[in-house]
Amino acid sequence: MKKKEKKLSASEIGAINNELIQKYGEGASQIIQALKGKRYDTFGNDLNHLGRSLKRINKYKINEDYRETNIKQQAGFSAELIKEARDNKENIINGEAVRTKTTDGIGQTNNPKYDHIKVDKTGKVILNSESQMKIYGSSEELVSKLAGKKWEKYLDSQIDVPTEQVEEIRKIAKEKAKIFREEANKAKNNGNIEIYNKKINQAESMDKIEKNVRDSGVKKQEAIDARLNPKKFVAKELIKDAHCAGKTAAKGAVLLSATISFGQS
């Protein structure tokens, strides 16, 4: 005997749709909060964000003699906010309590090692959740810098890189590790222990790069677009979010209205 399917009442369907709208609306509002430099919890309480905003980054001064370089460097700050907003949007939609925060957003201005941390539902920093973000430079440049003295401090944590570069960076690091080990073996066979140790250390640095780099969820051009025209970038993000929600709950138009309302509260 077939089990009868329970039909949802109109009120139950409405409650489900309302919950979806709330989740997608709150999730999509994260990028508006990044634009304005505000942070709110689910209940609309101000979380006292202490860091940058996309609007503020857009006003940073540019040396016209180094315009392209300045914009790319400043886009790194925009990328940090985009990652924070996208991470939190995904967690809100999935009903997860963990939140990503920029270190300057919690008052750790110019943290020398980390750009992001994750906190649990009580606001406590989650152990080993710290990460560094690097988006400026080619894949080869990023690998070389991460292996250098100045950036080696980042190698024991997660390193977020542009979406389009993560696999290439891993490939470069893997190939370099292989070469360094081959060179180390040659040095060992020749009795040159100093060179052997140096090459092994270089290979191990490459191993760490391959292991610890991860997709930031942000493309380099997106960060540049957000730096140059943050309002236009945010508008595009909201349209994409409305489309995603529309496919889920056929409530795209309502979502957009709810999102804008949430962001303006």
Image: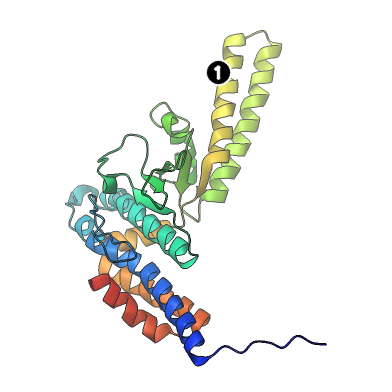
Q: Residue at x 55, y 25 (%)?
A: 202
What amino acid is labelled 1 in the image? Lys
Vertical comparison of 114 with 253: above or below:
above
Quick one: quadrant of the C terminus? bottom left
Given residues 121 and 33, the one toward you in this image is 121
Horizontal side of residue 186 vs 130, given as left or right = right
Q: Residue at x 68, y 18 (%)?
A: 186
Vertical comparison of 20 with 221: above or below:
below
The residue that disc 1 covers is 198
Q: Quadrant of residue 43?
A: bottom left
* Element type at mark 1: helix
Horizontal side of residue 206 vs 85, given as left or right = right
Given residues 163 and 253, the one toward you in this image is 253
Horizontal side of residue 102 vs 48, given as left or right = right
Q: Position of residue 137 (x, y in %)?
A: 41, 45
**In this view of the protein, can residue 106 be seen by the observer?**
yes
For mark 1, does the 10 Å Cα neighbourhood hold few (<14), some (14 to 19), or many (20 or more) residues?
some
Applied colour scheme: rainbow
Horizontal side of residue 96 vs 229, given as left or right = right
Q: Residue furthest right?
A: 1
